[in-house]
Image: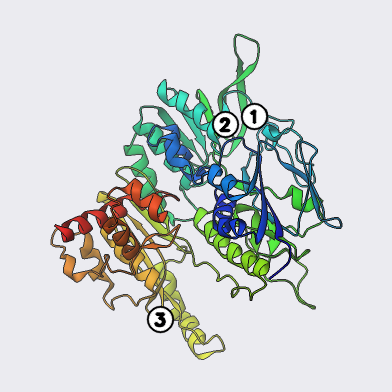
Amino acid sequence: MPESPLRVVVIGYGPVGARLVDELLPAVSAGLIELTVVGAEADAAYNRVLIAELAVGRAERETLDVTDPEEAIAAGVSVRTGVCAVSIERTRRTVTLSDGSVIGYDRIVLATGARANVPTLAGVTRLRYDYRRPADDARLLDSAEAPLPRGVTALRDLADADTVARAVGLGQKILVLGAGVLGMELALAAAEAGAEVGVVYHGEIPMARQLDRGAGLLLARGARHSAVSMISHSPAESVIFRQDSDGVDRFDALVCADGKQIFADLLVLSCGVGARSELARLAGLDVATGILVDENLTSWSDERIHAIGDCAQIAARPRIGDSQAPPRGAPSGLIGPGWRQADWLARALIAVASGVEKPAPLEADRSAVVMLKASGIDVVAVGDVSRDPLDDLADDVHGTAAAHTSGCLHEPPRRVSSWMDAEHGRYVKMITRGGVLEALVCVGMPRAAAELTLLFERRSELPTDRSVLLRHDGPDFDDASAGDAFAEDARVCWCNAVTVGAITSAAEAGNSTVTCIGKATRAGTGCGGCKERIGQVLERAAVLTT
């Protein structure tokens, strides 16, 4: 065992950084690791994924908390909040903070997360952060010298949630720029809470990264039926301001490329996020879309530096003769993969501190299941669903499928099965290879979506007759014909990989509510999309014990 503790500095105290800290607490208490965590926000780590629910009154502030800093402090962790790291001196192995203090390290973990993208709009300053030194005032980490104008916000932190909550409470008109999953969830929730809401996006369909045309059009129609104005084919170009009584400009309208002006009280930017990688870049680390790390979450440039979460881009290190082009891919942008990275890295760091063999490299995540959290609109998607059923016919006609099976690729072709009942808002597409589900999208069919998700997770073959899956949402559905959604190993929470068995055990130990289950197992504390399923498992457990 090493004579002195391993000095670890975690930069970033969001939900992923906090998860790493929590997993390291036993090693800190045992004296194996000397841990310092640095967070720019004064608040303890909270779940940003649920910010929209907080803004519309669906969640209480305390339900967003993902860690207890007092527990960490009691274990011996140095928790530094309200400050940020401004430089890393790799030769001396020190980190300088915005308050002037300097911390030595043996290992650094960058968990700096991501900031909201500010689109190119005339009237809104858009900064490049690539080589910009982080602000000395931690409160300006993202705004720097260019705060967003009044009436414009990006829903990323608690202050943003307060801004949206005021607009919702007053029943004001909210305009969401961007129709990704978070933008759609906010728009639908705010409309349900009484605000007048519109969504502006440049393409034909919302959630274009996850959905195909059929699913996207059904979602757009469902949103319109939920009183959300869907404004498609509208690239935004500029903003118009009016003056408040104190003479300061306030957002008044968004101007689109076709000249239309859309007036609102609040503009919410939901245009994706970008990794906070400027600290790594200034330290001379390899950076592409995110901070480049290998399958051991170790920087390409420095074996003493790691990165996890929204700032980390996992890619194989280049070998001699490889292309010099930047590696493909990007940080996952999802909380589940970030938490799994934190769990694995905690085990690896403890192994280093203990002088024992490190765990096997982190397994690559499969495509994540995306579930839209919205009342009355059921949307589930996973994987690349862009392939069209007619592509199968084209492959057969032109012999492409045969080439795949008889040539050097040695794998069966992808096949597509789809069904739509547009009148009633129902749609499903299943993409398989060798009968095994690789991707799916499902709208308005919650039972079929649950069955398909279970089959995707287990890598099980679909029935030869795909049409039997449609019966799950029919009036004559028989539970006995479905896969066992309550099997012990059936996954309920994708973000935390919590199974039915784990929830049942927690329920038997006295955890009788979804909130209690979250505290006991972490299920439901990620994206929140599984809370209904947790409730179903609890109901079943209660029936079995009576």
In the image: residue 22, left or right of residue 97: left
Asked if residue 110 can be seen in this view, the reply is: yes
Q: Where is residue 353 in the image (x, y as percent from the top left)?
A: 67, 66
Disc 1 element: loop
Q: Which colour scheme is used?
A: rainbow
Q: Distance between the residues labelled 1 and 3?
A: 51 Å
- Between disc 1 and disc 3, the foreground one is 1
Q: What residue type is labelled 2?
A: Thr
> Residue 59, relative to residue 404: is it above or below?
above
Q: Which of 198 and 66 is in front in this view?
A: 66
For image coordinates 47% across by 61% down, the residue present is 368
Q: Within 10 angstroms of label 3, few (less than 14), some, or many (20 or more) residues?
A: few
Residue under pointer 1: 148
Q: Which amino acid does label 3 sit on?
A: Gly
Q: Within 10 angstroms of label 2, few (less than 14), some, or many (20 or more) residues?
A: many
Q: Which amino acid does label 1 sit on?
A: Leu
For image coordinates 75% across by 63% down, the residue present is 304
Q: Position of residue 398 (x, y in %)?
A: 48, 81
In the image: residue 487, left or right of residue 315: left
For image coordinates 45% across by 27% down, the residue present is 165
Disc 3 element: loop
- Which of the numbered marks, if any, corresponds to residue 434? 3
Q: Which of 516 and 330 is in front in this view?
A: 516
> Residue 490, relative to residue 335: is it above or below?
below
Q: Position of residue 481 (x, y in %)?
A: 19, 70
- Which of the numbered marks, if any, corresponds to residue 153? 2
Q: How far apart are marks 3 and 2 (CA)?
A: 47 Å
Q: Distance between the residues labelled 1 and 2?
A: 7 Å
Asked if residue 419 can be seen in this view, the reply is: no
User: Which of marks 3 and 1 precedes in the sequence?
Assistant: 1
